[in-house]
Image (spheres, grey):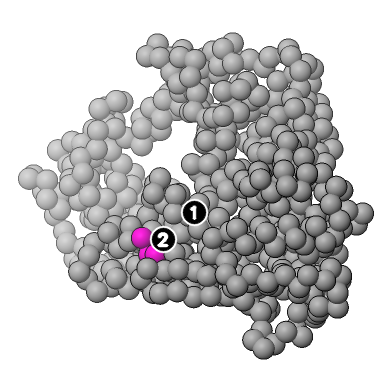
C-alpha cells in the first residue's frame, strides 16, 4: 500500500504526474525517486522542486495517523515528512486547534467562576469616611496621593497594580511594599475586585482564601458613595496641605525621618543601576541602608550619587582584575561608599553634586515630596539637615532677647561645641564688620589621614519681623569677601527667623556651583534643635 495519498490542487492539474512521482514510495516506505531525478524528468532546477510540489499538492500519510480523529497527517514536502519522523506527532493540526479551543473555553469558564467568587469576597464596600490628608501621617498621606493622583495610573478611582504602573510609585520595590502594606494595615486601601486574578490567593477548590498580593492588586479608597468621587475628595483635602507651609504640626515632626526614607531609597536605586552598568548585579540589604542613611546626614542625594559613582567604578575595576567573583566585587561597593564618606567628612572634601540619570526617572512619590511639597529647584542638592522645619514643642521665645544677646548666645553655643577652636566675637553688634559677627576654626579629625580645618564665619541676624531673603544671602557673600587674609571656607547665616524659598534656592545654587565660601544656614528650627540639647543656655537667656 502506498505511503501517501496525493491530493492535487485543481488549479495545478498539469503538475499531477510530477507530484505523484515526488511522493511515490517503495514497499519499505522509502522514496522511489530522488528529488534530482524528479527535477531532471520535468526539467526544473532541483532546488525548486519542493516549492513547486508544496504549492501544487499535499500528501496524506496512510501510516501516520492522528490519535484524535484517526485521519492521516498532511505533509507539504519531504522535509515535513522527515521532521515528523524525528518529532512524532500525536494529533493533527485540526485536533490540536480544537483541543486548544476547548482548553481556552474551560479556562474562561474557570476564570469566570473565579471572578464571581472574587466579586463576592472582595466586592466594593460602602461605609466609613473618606480619608482626610491632614489627619493622616505624612508618609501615608503622600503615598495615597502618589497612588491616586496620576491619571495614567487610575481609572474611575481605582489604581493600577503597583507592578503595572507607568511611573514608579517610589524609588524602590522594597519601599513600594513597605508603604503600601502599612496603608493596607491601617484600613486606608481596599482591594478592588477588578484586580487581576493572580493578585488573589486560591484554595485547591478554586475559591479565594481571603489573601492577596499587595503589589499585584488594584485599590480604591474607603468611604461612602461613588469610588471616583472618594478619590477626588481625598485629593482635594491633600491639595490643601500639600505645600510645606501648610503642613499640620505632626507632619513637621515626621518630615525628617520620611525624607531619609525616600532619600535612602533614591540612593539605593542609583547604586543598583550604577553597578548594573558595569555588569554587576547587587541586592541592597540593611547594611547598605545604614551606610547610605548615615551619609545622608552630611550630604545631599546628589553628593551621595558622587560617592556611589566612585564606588561602582572601583568595584568594577576590582572585578576586572579577575581575582574575585562578581558578587563579591558588587558587595565591596558598600564598604567603599562608607570609607569615602568618612574620609570626605573628616578632610572637608568639596563634594560634587551629581544629577539624576535618565535610567532612573523621578518616582511619583519623590516628585510630590520634592517638587510640590518642598518646592525645591534642585532636589539633588537639598538636605533637611541644612534647613529643618520647625518642630512642635521646641519653640523658643526669641522676642525676649535683643540682637546683642542673640550674638552672645551664638558665640556661647559655638564655644561649647566640640570641634570649634579660636572662637571670636566682634563685640560690637551691627558694626560695619563686613558680615563677620562670630568666627572660629572648625576642626575635622581623621585617625587615618590626619586632621584638617576650615575657617568659619557666622553672621547673626536676629530678625523676627522678616525672613532672610536671597538678596540678603548674596550681600552676606559680598561682605565676607572682604576678609581674604586668609579667606573663610564657610559662611554660616544664623537667624532667629526663617529663610524665604528664594533664599534657600539661591543658596542651593551657590553651593552647587562650588561657590566659595560655601553657605550653611541655621534657621530658628535648627537653633531650637541645637539649644534644646543645651538646656542651661535656654534658662540663661530666659528663652522658655
Question: Where in the figure is residue 20, as x and y percent of width and height?
Answer: 26, 51
Task: Name the residue located 50 percent from the left edge and 51 percent from the top edge.
Answer: 293
Question: Where in the figure is residue 460, as x and y percent of width and height?
Answer: 78, 64
Mark toward the start of the polypeptide (1 vs 2):
1
Locate the N terminus and report the quarter of the image it occupies.
Answer: top left
* In the displayed structure image, the side of residue 14 where residue 64 appears, left or right: left
Residue 431 sits above or below residue 73 on the image: below
The answer to whether residue 266 shows anywhere in this view is: no
Q: Secondary structure at mark 2?
A: helix
The answer to whether residue 406 shows anywhere in this view is: yes
Magenta range:
335-340
Residue 338 sits inside the magenta stretch: yes
Residue 237 sits inside the magenta stretch: no
User: Picture quarter containing residue 55?
Assistant: bottom left
Q: Which residue is mark 1?
A: 294
Determine whether label 1 and label 2 are within 8 Å by CB. yes
Residue 130 sits above or below residue 333 on the image: above
Task: Name the residue located 36 percent from the left edge and 37 percent from the top edge.
Answer: 93
The image's mark for residue 338 is 2
Amino acid at each position: 500500500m502506498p505511503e501517501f495519498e496525493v491530493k492535487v490542487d485543481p488549479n495545478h492539474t498539469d503538475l499531477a504526474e510530477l507530484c505523484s512521482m515526488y511522493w511515490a514510495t517503495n514497499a519499505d516506505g522509502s522514496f522511489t525517486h530522488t528529488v534530482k531525478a524528479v527535477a531532471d524528468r520535468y526539467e526544473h532546477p532541483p532546488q525548486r522542486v519542493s516549492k513547486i510540489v508544496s504549492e501544487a499538492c499535499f500528501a496524506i500519510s496512510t501510516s501516520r495517523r492522528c490519535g484524535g480523529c484517526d485521519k492521516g497527517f498532511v505533509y507539504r514536502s519531504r522535509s515535513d515528512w522527515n521532521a515528523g519522523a524525528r518529532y512524532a506527532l500525536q494529533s493533527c493540526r485540526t485536533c490540536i486547534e480544537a483541543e486548544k479551543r476547548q482548553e481556552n473555553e474551560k479556562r474562561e469558564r474557570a476564570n469566570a467562576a473565579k471572578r464571581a467568587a472574587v466579586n463576592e469576597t472582595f466586592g466594593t464596600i460602602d461605609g466609613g469616611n473618606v480619608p482626610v490628608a491632614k489627619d493622616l501621617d505624612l508618609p501615608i498621606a503622600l503615598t495615597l496621593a502618589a497612588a491616586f493622583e496620576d491619571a495614567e495610573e487610575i481609572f474611575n478611582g481605582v489604581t493600577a497594580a503597583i507592578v503595572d504602573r507607568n511611573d514608579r510609585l517610589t524609588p524602590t520595590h522594597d519601599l513600594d511594599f513597605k508603604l503600601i502594606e502599612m496603608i493596607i494595615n491601617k484600613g486606608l486601601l481596599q482591594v478592588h475586585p477588578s484586580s487581576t486574578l493572580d493578585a488573589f490567593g486560591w484554595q485547591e477548590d478554586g475559591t479565594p482564601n481571603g489573601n492577596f498580593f499587595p503589589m499585584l492588586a488594584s485599590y480604591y479608597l474607603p468611604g461612602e458613595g461613588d469610588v471616583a468621587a472618594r478619590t477626588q475628595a481625598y485629593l482635594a483635602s491633600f491639595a490643601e496641605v500639600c505645600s510645606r507651609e501648610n503642613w499640620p504640626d505632626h507632619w513637621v515632626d515626621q518630615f525628617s525621618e520620611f525624607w531619609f526614607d525616600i532619600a535612602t531609597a533614591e540612593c539605593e536605586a542609583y547604586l543598583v543601576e550604577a553597578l548594573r552598568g558595569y555588569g554587576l548585579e547587587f541586592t541592597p540589604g540593611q547594611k547598605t541602608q545604614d551606610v547610605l542613611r548615615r551619609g545622608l546626614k552630611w550630604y545631599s542625594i546628589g553628593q551621595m550619587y558622587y560617592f556611589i559613582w566612585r564606588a561602582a567604578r572601583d568595584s568594577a575595576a576590582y572585578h576586572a582584575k579577575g581575582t574575585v567573583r562578581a558578587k563579591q566585587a558588587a558587595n565591596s561597593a558598600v564598604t567603599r561608599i562608607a570609607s569615602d564618606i568618612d574620609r570626605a567628612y573628616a578632610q572637608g572634601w568639596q563634594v560634587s553634586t551629581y544629577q539624576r540619570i535618565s535610567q532612573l526617572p523621578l518616582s511619583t512619590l519623590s516628585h510630590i515630596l520634592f517638587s510640590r511639597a518642598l518646592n525645591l529647584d534642585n532636589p539633588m542638592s537639598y538636605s533637611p539637615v541644612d534647613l529643618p522645619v520647625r518642630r512642635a514643642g521646641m519653640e523658643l521665645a526669641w522676642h525676649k532677647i535683643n540682637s546683642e544677646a542673640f550674638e552672645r548666645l551664638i558665640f556661647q553655643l559655638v564655644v561649647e561645641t566640640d570641634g570649634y577652636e579660636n572662637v571670636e566675637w566682634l563685640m560690637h553688634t551691627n558694626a560695619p564688620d563686613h558680615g563677620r559677627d562670630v568666627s572660629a576654626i572648625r576642626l575635622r579629625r581623621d585617625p587615618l589621614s590626619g586632621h584638617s580645618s576650615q575657617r568659619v564665619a557666622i553672621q547673626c541676624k536676629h530678625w523676627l519681623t522678616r525672613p532672610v531673603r536671597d538678596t540678603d544671602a548674596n550681600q552676606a557673600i559680598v561682605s565676607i569677601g572682604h576678609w581674604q587674609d586668609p579667606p573663610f571656607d564657610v559662611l554660616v547665616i544664623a537667624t532667629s527667623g526663617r529663610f524665604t524659598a528664594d533664599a534657600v534656592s539661591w543658596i542651593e545654587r551657590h553651593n552647587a556651583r562650588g561657590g566659595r565660601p560655601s553657605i550653611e544656614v541655621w534657621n530658628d528650627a535648627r537653633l531650637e534643635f541645637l539649644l534644646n540639647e543645651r538646656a542651661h543656655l535656654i534658662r540663661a537667656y530666659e528663652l522658655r
